[in-house]
Image: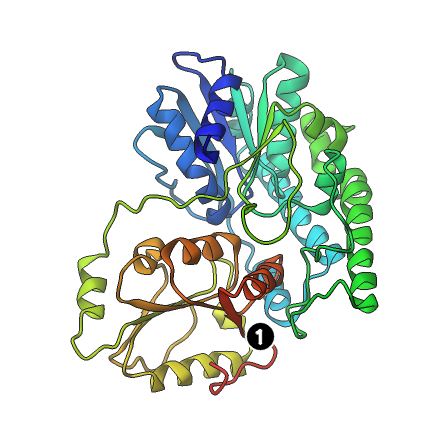
Amino acid sequence: MTPPINAFIAIVTVVNMSNAANVLVMSMHGSSSHIGSMQGYLMKLAEAGHSVTVLETNGRKGANDYGSAIKTEHIYIPDNIRDNEAYSEIWWRSSPTSALVTSIYYNIGDKALQKILKLDPETFWRVTNSSWDLIMVDELFTVHGYGVATLHKRLHSTPYIIFSPSLMFFTNYVINSLGRCSVCRMQLTLSSLNEIDYQPSVFAHRAQNFFEHFIEYIALGYFVQWFGMPHLREIGISNFTWHEYFRDASAILSDSIINIGHPTPGGTEMTNIGSRCANINNTLTEDLDGFISDPESQGTIYAAFGTHANWNTAPTFLRDAFMTAFEELSDYRIIFAYNGAVTHIPKHMRIVKFAPQKEILNDNRTKLFISHGGLKSMKESICAGVPVVFMPIFAEQAHNTLLARQLGIGETLNKSNVTKEYI
């Protein structure tokens, strides 16, 4: 049985085959990538006749459109420019560690819950106090979702599903009694500043790997659980534990890749849905299609580094390296998803703030993808069969990059020493 069918059966089983079950979905604050990983399954539920509602929180004043059959409850939380710039500085100039990743992102999630309760408590409590047959919560950093799911489970025995949109933390594998070797498989937070490498035969690599796993377990399993989500108390959850949260989940859906690379543990309560390729039903816009159809072009180079990359705060040498390299690649048509300042755009280059990534990658004229190494981008490049160059920036991206290099499906750039010549 294929993973998508398996996942769909698991979801439908939880809602007891109701003709019109009410399903509430919550994902990480401000992350279009996380909810995007869930969207295909939400559409399947809606097509099956269930009523699906997404409670989204972000800095956009309007609600996103997740499909005609999916409702949206939108809570607008204005972006804190100072915080965003600080996070962006860390992204570009620091390397991820277990302590840094858990402290930053769970702090973002808890601050989001605080602002939800301050800015729009009416919408939050109206949604929370509604009757739901199933709740689906993003595994990562979705503090308000943890609270709502826990409240409903305790008060109404409402079933909930945990949806992991990326790689699961080592700590969460341990909590779920799923064995995972802490030295033979590299940790999620590999350095994105140094040479990306992990060899289990090297003692220093094993020691660093064990240290990062240990710090993650202490940081997430104890400090975040006890001290990192204080605003859960404001909605009536004073004794939240990861053990209870995962134990009471009716199912766990994981969007990671398990059919290639390293062995991944599984369990009866976990269904992997990541090893699949989505159908591409849309085509390129007329504008983009006309741009890349230039008869003088040898093909398309597409560069995109995720929705969190703020190029205005990127190091100057990094911006200059990409711009000068792209300017010299005049035999190709280049699409660059870029939100920084631009003084000159060559005619063979198109700057966009948002690009239809799947459609570009699946166009037969696309010759190369330059990416940050996010899990979705990695999977989409594999599905499209497009050669890829990864420049990991933060989070688990160096882990994905090393895996791609080990599998022989990608090359790497280092954000700390990129030059025009390297590109």
Disc 1 secondary structure class:
loop
Q: Is residue 248 visible?
A: yes
Determine crowd level at label 1: few under 14, some 14-19, many 20+ residues with C-alpha closer than 10 A: many
- Against 50, is 283 above or below? below
* Image quadrant where residue 18 sits: top left
Q: In the displayed structure, would residue 374 be above or below residue 129? A: below
Q: Position of residue 360 (x, y in %)?
A: 31, 60
Q: Is residue 30 left or right of residue 242?
A: left
> Can you identify the residue that label 1 sits on?
415
Q: Amino acid at mark 1?
A: Lys
Q: Position of residue 407 (x, y in %)?
A: 55, 62
Q: Please give the name of the residue rendered at 65% of the width and 50% of the height, measured from the top-left corner.
A: 105
Q: Quadrant of residue 292?
A: bottom left
Residue at horizontal 70 percent and vertical 58 percent from the top: 186
The residue under the point 36% across, 21% down is: 48
Q: Position of residue 361 (x, y in %)?
A: 34, 59
Q: Is residue 132 visible?
A: no
Residue at (38, 77) in percent of width and height: 342
Q: Position of residue 77 (x, y in %)?
A: 51, 45
